[in-house]
Amino acid sequence: MRKVFFSFHYERDILRVGQIRNSGIVLAPGDTSAGFTDSASWESIKRQGDDAIKRWIGDQLKGTSVTVVLIGAETANRPWVNYEIQESIKCGNGLLGIYIHNVLDLNRRTDTKGANPFDYLTWTKTGRPISETYRTYDWISDSGRQNLPAWIEAAARDAGR
């Protein structure tokens, strides 16, 4: 089983992300996964400043081979999401995005579809958006529950991992 880092907009999307995290396909009972933290831990890290957040992200990326960006209504251009994507690329991780706006929240509501964060980051050498390289999927319409392991393997294979 691959160690995967999950990147997302914590404040806006944690409830939707929690449903994916607890779906039984991301984590087996007793497992932990990089990029997931509880609100108390996240608030503690944030209070320590930007350097502490960067250290935490670096520690979480260690040993991972794929980064999954969970894309909600306001994920694109979030500074820490962008940083996590850039650091994942530096690490040689496979990368993929999954739209989560159609995952029901606790009030059984969906959200608006957000922009693809990969559209706003470019390759240094070509200036082309990284969205031309990395795939995105929709958790609901692309059957994420059934397909996430295959998406992760494809991203790893594309990155040579």
Image (spheres, helix red, strand yellow):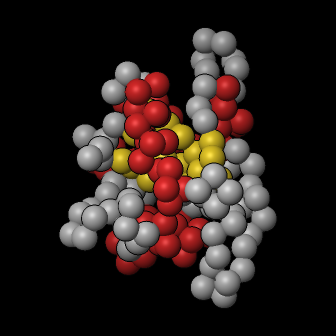
Name the image quarter holding the C terminus.
top left
As drawn, the residue found furthest toward the right would be 112
Q: Residue at x 63, y 79 (%)?
A: 105
Vertical arrangement, residue 116 with respect to residue 158, above or below: below
Residue 93 % position (x, y) = 40, 33
Location of residue 109 (image quadrant): bottom right
Q: Residue at x 33, y 54 (%)?
A: 34
Q: Residue at x 63, y 52 (%)?
A: 142
Residue 54 % position (x, y) = 39, 47
Relative to 24, 138 lies left or right: right
Vertical arrangement, residue 41 with respect to residue 125, above or below: below
Regarding residue 31, the answer to whether it shows in the image is: yes
Q: Residue at x 66, y 12 (%)?
A: 126
Seen from the viewer's position, the closer of residues 75 and 1 is 1
Vertical arrangement, residue 101 with respect to residue 89, above or below: below
Vertical arrangement, residue 138 with respect to residue 83, above or below: below
Location of residue 140 (image quadrant): bottom right
Residue 35 % position (x, y) = 39, 56
Relative to 99, 3 lies left or right: left
Regarding residue 67, the answer to whether it shows in the image is: no
Relative to 96, 71 lies left or right: right
As drawn, the residue found furthest toward the top would be 125
Seen from the viewer's position, the closer of residues 151 and 99 is 151
Relative to 138, 158 lies left or right: left
Count every numbered label the image shows and give the total: 0
As drawn, the residue found furthest toward the left would be 30
Residue 7 % position (x, y) = 49, 52
Seen from the viewer's position, the closer of residues 14 and 55 is 14
